[in-house]
Amino acid sequence: MALLNYVFKKRYPTLSKQIDEYVVYLTSLFSRAANIDGFTYLCTLLRVEGITSGYWDAFVEAEEALEDLNRLLRSTQTKRQVKRKIRLGLFIYCHATEMSAPYEILANLLRCCHNKLYKMHPFSHLVRIGKKKEFFAKRYLPNSKNKIDHLRELATACGEKKITQIIESFFRNDIRNAFYHSDYTISDNEFRIIEGAELGKKTITLEELSSILTKCFAFYSAFSIVYKKVRQDLARGQKYHRWPNYEVLELLSEKEELTGFKIHFPNKSHAMFERKEHEGTTALNIRLEEEGISLMVGNLDEYKKAEDWFVEGKSFDEYGSRYNRYSYWRPIIFQGDTQKIDKKVFEMTEDKTVQGCLFYIFTTGHKAIEFALKSDKDLFKRKEYSRSRLKKKKHFVIRKCENKGSSHFLFDGTYFLESVNEESIQYALKQIFAYIDSFQKRGIKIQHRLKHKLYSDVKPVQKENGSFTLTLSTDDPRNTLVATHLGMFPKSDWKIKEEWI
């Protein structure tokens, strides 16, 4: 759906500018939701619901209808067709502002930004029941105005007032009602509401009406552009994502667009949801709650005994993946038995540095060593430095981190391992330290730190009376190696900071 797409924008510079402005804001809103709760965000993009057959998705039909109306509008260009153009514009306006899906998606994005779970029917509390309190009593569904009012509440709660300010800048219930109820006329310079206005009659200049329609078309075009792009980006990105309880999330896609997800459980069972444009939805082992989604994992005994990640019944092993996004450093989130991990690590080596590396590997599933660097000079001109083994597989990668307002340069590095044992880790550590040493020999002041150590290096402060104090901040990933949930920590920015190195 692109009510007036980028090709058409050349004829309408105001529309073009408005679309670009809305795209920037909506991109930031989608991004914020994605960074707060990835799974709620995923459910929002897919509009997760129960099983349906083909041609039951009103949003798909609405998008196709708007495309058809858009073509008609673009073919109406002569001066004699001005009123036809206005009427088509009003029809598109009403059709767009009545669509349920965009409101529901925005509601769940705002819920996500406020740390609330996905809700299949985010406006269900606005449904009114008829006077007869029977099972088949008539239901009165919320209208667009009711939904916008609730969006305003959600937006205020999470500091995203701009989204409703944008919608309210073009949403006019009086125009919508007048057009739908044939309660209007169009003169040479006015849109006139005959009976439905509060004072009986009302006039709106065609110039003002044009501004309202332009903002509406721009918003829904921008929404469509961003909504499609984020689904395409996910389809093209990382396919498998390990979860902290030995589950693997697989993103499903078709024609380079996200269509669903599949969650692989460690007892070799799975749950899934998929939505295809004209084929309906498929769901397995998921239950939609009033808020959130429950997963039916199958054999609980086998699930609880798990000590590894599985996909399609086979141990999940991949090369070249890491736990943290580049430029980020957060505590390890793991919901398994850490005592078993400790025992396994201690049996493999007595080297404390290697123990930390092994603990990272066994709790995250990623065969890698992550480290951070800080230097007084830029180490390389490009954004990334890397080395590759045979078959062009990168095994040593260092990327620059943003560090505005400082004279120091920050870098985030990874050494990817092909095997997990003390010898391979020792070799990798030597390679990392040799790289650092090569800069130190050239007079560059450079500091480094492995991100995830098994032992804290925070030093106690000695007092005069012989006692000491030890200060640990939960906003500092150096102080917490592992936790069961990121929500245990106060709101924190996990971007790499100078003082952590």
Image: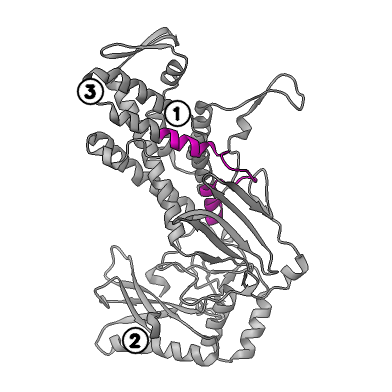
Q: Earlier in the sequence, mark 2 or mark 1?
A: 1
Q: Position of residue 493 (x, y in %)?
A: 45, 60
Does residue 364 lie above or below 60 as drawn? below
* Amino acid at pointer 1: His
Are discs 2 and 1 less than 8 Å apart at CB? Answer: no
Q: Main secondary structure of the magenta part?
A: helix
Does residue 377 lie above or below 422 as drawn? above
Residue 49 is a magenta residue: yes
Q: Nearer the viewer, mark 2 or mark 3?
A: 3
Q: Nearer the viewer, residue 449 or 474?
A: 449
Quarter of the image for the C terminus: give it.
bottom left
Q: Nearer the viewer, residue 24 or 61?
A: 61
Q: Residue at x 30, y 18 (%)?
A: 83
Does residue 352 lie above or below 64 as drawn? below
User: In the structure shown, which secondary structural element does the residue marked by tag 3 occupy?
Assistant: loop
- Indicate the quadrant where residue 403 lies: bottom left
Q: CA distance from mark 2 to mark 3?
A: 69 Å
